[in-house]
Image: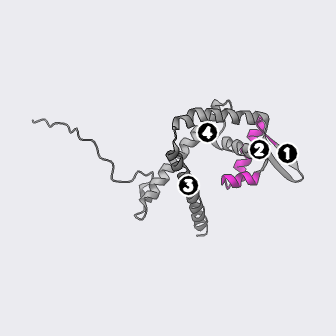
Amino acid sequence: MARTKASTKPATAPSQPIVSSAHLVSPHSAEMSEFEFGLIVSGNAFHRWVVHCMSAAGLKDLTALDVLVLHHVTHRARDKRLADIAFIMNVEDTHLINYALKKLQGLGVVISSKNGKEVTYGPTEAGKAYVTRYREIRDSCLINALKADDALNHDIGELARLLRVLSGIYDQAARSAASL
């Protein structure tokens, strides 16, 4: 029996899009399915990152939403209302934000204050310290590893703009689907 020589030719790139759900690929935009798969994978990686970064900062056993709520409550040094936090973070279920706020209050990193009927939330000094330490770790582990130059920062800014545009399109599509 003759032996054939193994091919040393490099494998070619797949001709089909890389997607999580081939049954959803539209002939009009396979790229959208590729984008959605990338969004799933990068979203999960981002959530894993924020949890590990905050854990390294010393605040353990938080979910990604807990961490993001703490960052938003600290944002611009202004107290926030529950509805405003949910609105800015584009979280429809305010119960999720409320649960995160209660958990963060229990950890002593968020405090609530009442002015008449309005309840607002802000960081405690301990919360600010954890957020500061998070930023230091973020700079060290993420920003420095990125080694971004002006061109890459421009691309990241364009990607952020595109994500905001697509967020609006997905929101409109959700409203349309809800009306069916």
Q: Earlier in the sequence, mark 3 or mark 1?
A: 1
Label 1 vs label 2, nearer the camera: 2
Residue 42: percent from the left, percent from the top? 52, 45
Q: What's the distance in space between the residues labelled 3 and 1, CA to CA?
A: 34 Å
Label 3 vs label 4, nearer the camera: 3
Residue 131 shows in the view: yes
Considering the image in quadrants, where does the C terminus appear?
bottom right
Find disc 1 in the rendering and name its residue. 113
Find disc 4 in the rendering and name its residue. 50
Q: Quadrant of residue 127?
A: top right
Label 3 vs label 1, nearer the camera: 3
Q: Is residue 97 magenta?
A: yes
Amino acid tagged 1: Ser
Q: What's the distance in space between the residues labelled 3 and 4, CA to CA?
A: 19 Å
Name above or below for residue 57 compared with residue 123. Answer: above
Specify start and end residues of the magenta stretch as a single range: 82-111
Q: Earlier in the sequence, mark 1 or mark 2?
A: 2
Residue 2: percent from the left, percent from the top? 10, 36
Q: Earlier in the sequence, mark 2 or mark 3?
A: 2
Q: What's the distance in space between the residues labelled 2 and 4, CA to CA?
A: 21 Å
* Neighbourhood count class around disc 2 (C-alpha, 10 Å): few under 14, some 14–19, many 20 upward: few
Find disc 2 in the rendering and name its residue. 77
Residue 49: percent from the left, percent from the top? 58, 38
Amino acid tagged 2: Ala
Q: Earlier in the sequence, mark 1 or mark 4?
A: 4
Name above or below for residue 55 compared with residue 90. Answer: above
Q: Are marks 1 and 2 in contact (CB under 8 Å)?
A: no
Amino acid tagged 4: Val
